[in-house]
Image (cartoon, rainbow, N blue to C red):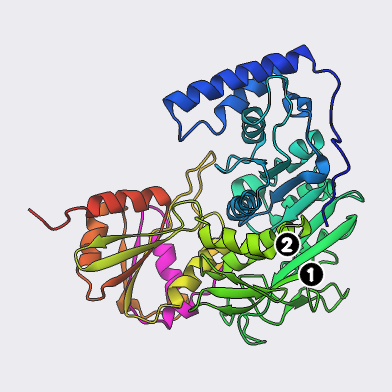
């Protein structure tokens, strides 16, 4: 149970530099709110940090026992936003960065918006989504007593290198005074329980029979985060997430975690946890881990299951995850993923594979241009299992883009897709992409690509074929 021990970082006197930074940040936030109300999740924090680099340390009224940081590779935003929604549904006041701005400027913006003119936080709880690389800097300024780690996986290689590098970034935030919430079925996350004051484990019962791991000949297991030997997975709920054991050192998932989602009924959109039934607002398997973590923190904080249930009934996730548009009689369903991240690509593939209708699979993996250095990534596709999609009834596979369309086609061939079902378009021209889709028989179309490319295709599809 989460208990308060007082305002751990209350200050008797604020320094003038902090107050000047706070004033400048609030003025910027007010201006941004008038000019661009849907934006400005970083700018006011950036301004404040320019005035005072130690700005995050200056706030008072933060109860560190009621401060929760949510970090990890995948699922931070969904978990953070769901958790805040649960707390607010239960009548708790919360300061948070719901816009997903999870680095220092985003944290600074969230705090300055919810503080008094003297820098005292107005809310009882502080719940922040925190970027893994930014965690050491933010935690140093605000040493939260509760740290949630969704998972630690491959992501943005030009920025993060390998997952073990990120694991080393997270470890310093775990100490004897920290309650850490770890994913029982994700080995790197679970390894962070060592050295913590208390570990709360969350998980999901196996969604597939034991032994139902990845059959793809290119699939590999991951090394044990403690000894480096190869882990044995009994089954996978997600890519590299499932019941596991290290045959060398004995590190393993618990037979029964503290908070486990069970009895998942996708058709009825319900699951159970701790003997309580809860609604399932989104059905994809990766959301189950978000639910498990959010419910674990809420119940530890003393929130009643009835309040959690009410919150899940009314929860709406951030946009752009699952969207669709019409192309004549066809429905193009967009399954969002991060190309820098094989686990989200695998989750998207699993969604497509679960649909047994005849379909078109439209995939545009292209150059990653989110920040310098730009790069073209082909190897993540070999971390994923395409066999489910290949067996699900695909009429045609259309690979498009300027850089890796032929690499994607090769990966499909390695998965056993007949060459005659693959069409390659060596560009990202939206009109040409839609023309190829329109020429197919199947009315169900699944699209995997960048969000901006989806938006351009959706815009181009308006009135397509008319006039």
Q: Which residue is located at x 82 percent, y 50 percent?
A: 171
Q: Quadrant of residue 291?
A: bottom right
Residue that carries the numbered disc 2 in the rendered image: 296
The answer to whether residue 219 of the structure is visible from this angle is no
Separation of residues labelled 1 and 2 (CA atoms): 8 Å
| Mark 1 surroundings within 10 Å by alpha-carbon count, few (fewer than 14), some (14 through 19), many (20 or more) | some
- 349 relative to 165, above or below: below
Q: Which residue is located at x 48 percent, y 48 percent?
A: 368
Q: Which residue is located at x 57 percent, y 18 percent?
A: 27
Q: Which residue is located at x 74 percent, y 14 percent?
A: 17
Residue 398 locus on image (x, y percent): 32, 67
- 195 relative to 16, above or below: below
Left or right: where does residue 280 sit relative to residue 222? left
The front one of 90 and 236 is 90
Left or right: where does residue 162 sit relative to residue 249? left
Asked if residue 440 is among those painted magenta in the image, a careful observer would answer no
- 145 relative to 216, above or below: above
Helix, strand or loop at mark 1: loop
Write down the region rendered in magenta.
383-412
């Amino acid at each position: 149970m989460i208990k308060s021990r007082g305002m751990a970082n209350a200050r008797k006197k604020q320094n003038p530099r902090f107050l000047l930074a706070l004033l400048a940040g609030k003025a910027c936030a007010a201006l941004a709110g008038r000019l661009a109300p849907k934006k400005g999740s970083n700018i006011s924090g950036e301004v404040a940090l320019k005035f005072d680099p130690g700005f995050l340390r200056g706030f008072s009224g933060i109860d560190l026992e009621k401060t929760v940081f949510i970090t990890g590779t995948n699922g931070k935003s969904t978990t953070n936003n769901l958790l805040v929604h649960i707390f607010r549904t239960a009548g708790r006041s919360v300061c948070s960065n719901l816009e997903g701005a999870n680095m220092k400027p985003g944290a600074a913006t969230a705090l300055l918006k919810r503080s008094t003119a003297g820098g005292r936080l107005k809310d009882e709880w502080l719940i922040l989504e925190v970027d893994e690389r930014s965690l050491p800097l933010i935690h140093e300024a605000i040493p939260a007593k509760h740290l949630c780690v969704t998972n630690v996986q491959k992501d943005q290689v030009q920025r993060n290198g390998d997952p073990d590098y990120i694991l080393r970034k997270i470890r310093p935030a775990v100490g004897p005074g920290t309650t850490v919430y770890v994913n029982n079925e994700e080995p790197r996350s679970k390894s962070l329980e060592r050295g913590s004051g208390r570990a709360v484990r969350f998980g999901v019962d196996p969604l597939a029979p034991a032994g139902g791991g990845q059959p793809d000949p290119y699939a590999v297991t991951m090394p044990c985060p403690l000894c480096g030997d190869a882990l044995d997975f009994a089954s996978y709920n997600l890519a590299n997430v499932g019941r596991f054991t290290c045959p060398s050192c004995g590190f393993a998932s618990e037979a029964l975690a503290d908070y486990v989602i069970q009895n998942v009924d996708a058709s009825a959109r319900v699951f159970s946890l701790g003997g309580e039934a809860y609604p399932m607002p989104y059905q994809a398997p990766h959301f189950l881990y978000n639910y498990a973590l959010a419910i674990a923190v809420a119940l530890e904080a003393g929130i009643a299951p009835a309040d959690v249930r009410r919150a899940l009934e009314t929860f709406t996730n951030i946009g752009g995850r699952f969207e669709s548009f019409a192309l004549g009689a066809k429905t193009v369903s967009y399954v969002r993923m991060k190309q820098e991240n094989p686990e989200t690509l695998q989750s998207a593939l699993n969604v497509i594979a679960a649909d047994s209708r005849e379909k078109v699979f439209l995939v545009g993996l292209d150059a990653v241009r989110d920040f310098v250095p730009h790069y073209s990534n082909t190897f993540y596709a070999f971390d994923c299992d395409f066999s489910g999609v290949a067996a699900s009834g695909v009429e045609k596979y259309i690979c498009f883009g300027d850089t890796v369309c032929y690499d994607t086609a090769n990966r499909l061939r390695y998965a056993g897709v007949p060459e005659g079902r693959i069409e390659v378009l060596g560009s990202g021209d939206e009109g040409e992409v839609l023309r190829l889709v329109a020429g197919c028989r199947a009315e169900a179309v699944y699209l995997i690509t960048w969000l901006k490319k989806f938006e351009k295709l959706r815009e181009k599809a308006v009135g397509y074929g008319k006039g």
